[in-house]
Amino acid sequence: MTNRTYILPLLLRIWHWSNALLMILLMISGINLHFSYLPVTIMSFELSIAVHNVSGITLSVLYILYLLWNGYTGNWRQYVPKLNGLTDNINRQNYFVMRGIFKGDPPPVLPTQEHKYNVVQQITYFLVMYGAMPLLIITGLVFFFPEVAPESLFDFNGMVLVAISHYVTGFVFVMFMIGHIYMGTMGITVSAGIKMMITGWHDHHSRKIQKND
Amino acid sequence: MPKKSVGAENDATEISTTMAGLIARLVKTLGIVLMFNMSISIAVAAELTPISPEDMQNIRNSQAECLQCHSEEGFAALEQKDFELAQLQGLFVDKAALEASSHGRVDCLACHVTGYKEYPHFKAAKSIINNCDECHTRLFMVIEEQYFESVHHKQMKQKFDCNTCHDPHTFLKASRFATVGEAVAQDNAICVQCHGITKSLTKLSNGRQKDLEQTHDWLPNLTSHWEKVRCVDCHTKTSKKALSHNIMDGKGAQRDCVNCHQLDSDLLMRQYAHLVEQEREKYGFVNSIILNEAYVIGATRNRYIDLAFGLISILVLAGIGIHILIRIVARRRRNNSHD
């Protein structure tokens, strides 16, 4: 029996890293636009607008392709957690993060072709990809067509609430990104998850290394 | 002795001349001060002082008398027309617009002073209409100074006066509009009268006049900017007395987005200047006077949200940092116990 499994096809990895790059660009340019008078800025206000617009549109196109691909291949099922034993699975995952990892325990769930994600990943990715992402894209697109925003909402100009929703969702993504990167180090070894995202292969053999650590 | 007396006489004459000169200057200065104060009161009184119903009625009666001929409705209602409609073309005033304008409570004869009571009007009367500075003296001192710096004065001073931009029969001060957006629409319409050039007109003028959309194509969300920002907000130099008359051409105009798109936004010195005193942080929003009009990236900020996000970021990063630290320590301990 082989010690490694091919889990992530090339297309999925390209999509993942494109998303990562675009989100970093969106984060930097977004911070620059919102806090426009910082003493140190990575890029000018004008460049930030261009970068934010181009990255935002590209991310939206990628998201639509992702939705189509997900629907076509049935990959969307990967994001739906099993309701049977849901609480136990969540508790098991939380125990690993809060205690098990310090004791050198292996992750309770290892990725396979059939089940790529653990239950916490499933719930988080589901909320992020099917809740936060559409909200981020829709509110972002309204900036291109401000005339579609309501004239006024709760005593404010309609764009104010659209913009705040965009800002809040953007912040959620930044937090997700930080958490996601860190959780990526909690595989069998510190680098196993990141290696898998690059090569597509998950090395089960690493379990031994982890235990020996 | 005679010499001395002549000298003394001369001295006395000199002193009296000097004194007379001083008194004359004093009287002149006093006169100017008095006129200045009176002028201020004339312009400001119309807006600030309540007009009694009787005085208001007199003003309306006087306006109605003029509008009998100088409005389309009035002219149409005239039973005996002693002149052709063509003679009055360009001399009509919109009654509703006049009444709603900043001069709506001013008697027509306050500006059209000489030769207008009689009918037909004295021919030269047109050239002796009161200048704007007769009432707007104090503002005029700043406006004139700014205007002399403007591209309009530098390039077309023969063709320019106040009325070129500000129709005294319709113009309304920004502070009198219900919303800033309406004031923006009025002010931008003034510029567009001459500068609203389409591509075809650009071609006809051999490129002397540029297509506005083309010259502003660098501006993101062009329509939003044109609807929410006055042309003069970018096409004037920033000054403490933001009366926006030092109008610059494209080369001299503001191009730094951050002037407006920041916490200390220039917009508060410009189109929102008359509202700045009302500025109160509303639900934690900074520059809250803009909230009803627009969302201005970089200027519309909420202190609470920014603070909360800052704190959450610190907590998340600190949490991860602690987690990493515990992982490192735990791993070392495990390694040591294996050894």
Image (cartoon, coloured by chain):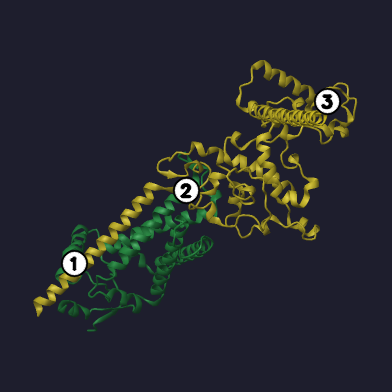
Chain colours: A green, B yellow
**Figure quadrant of the C terminus of chain B:** bottom left
The residue beneath circle 1 is: B326
Image coordinates for residue B326, horizontal then vertical, percent: 18, 67
Q: CA distance from mark 3 to mark 1?
A: 93 Å
Of all chains, the one bearing label 3 is B
Would you call the spot at circle 1 few (<14 residues within 10 Å), some (14-19), or many (20 or more)?
some
- Residue drawn at the location 51% of the way across and 45% of the way down: A150
Q: Nearer the viewer, residue B116 or B337?
A: B116
The residue beneath circle 3 is: B116
The residue beneath circle 2 is: B300
Q: CA distance from mark 2 to mark 3?
A: 52 Å
Image coordinates for residue B240, horizontal then vertical, percent: 57, 44
Of all chains, the one bearing label 2 is B
| Mark 2 or 3: the one toward you | 3
- Residue drawn at the location 77% of the way across and 25% of the way down: B109
Q: Secondary structure at mark 2?
A: loop
Q: Amino acid at mark 1?
A: Ile
Q: Quadrant of residue A30?
A: bottom left
Q: Is residue A47 above or below residue B16?
A: below
- Of the residues under marks 2 and 3, which one precedes in the sequence? 3
Q: Are marks 2 and 3 in contact (CB under 8 Å)?
A: no
Of all chains, the one bearing label 1 is B
Does the rendering let one see residue B45?
yes
Q: Secondary structure at mark 3?
A: loop
Would residue A95 appear left or right of B44 to someone viewing this image? left
Q: Is residue A106 above or below residue B117?
A: below
Q: Nearer the viewer, residue B64 or B131?
A: B131
Image coordinates for residue B84, horizontal then vertical, percent: 89, 30
- Residue drawn at the location 52% of the way across and 64% of the way down: A47
**Figure quadrant of the N terminus of chain B:** top right
Q: Are marks 3 and 1 in contact (CB under 8 Å)?
A: no
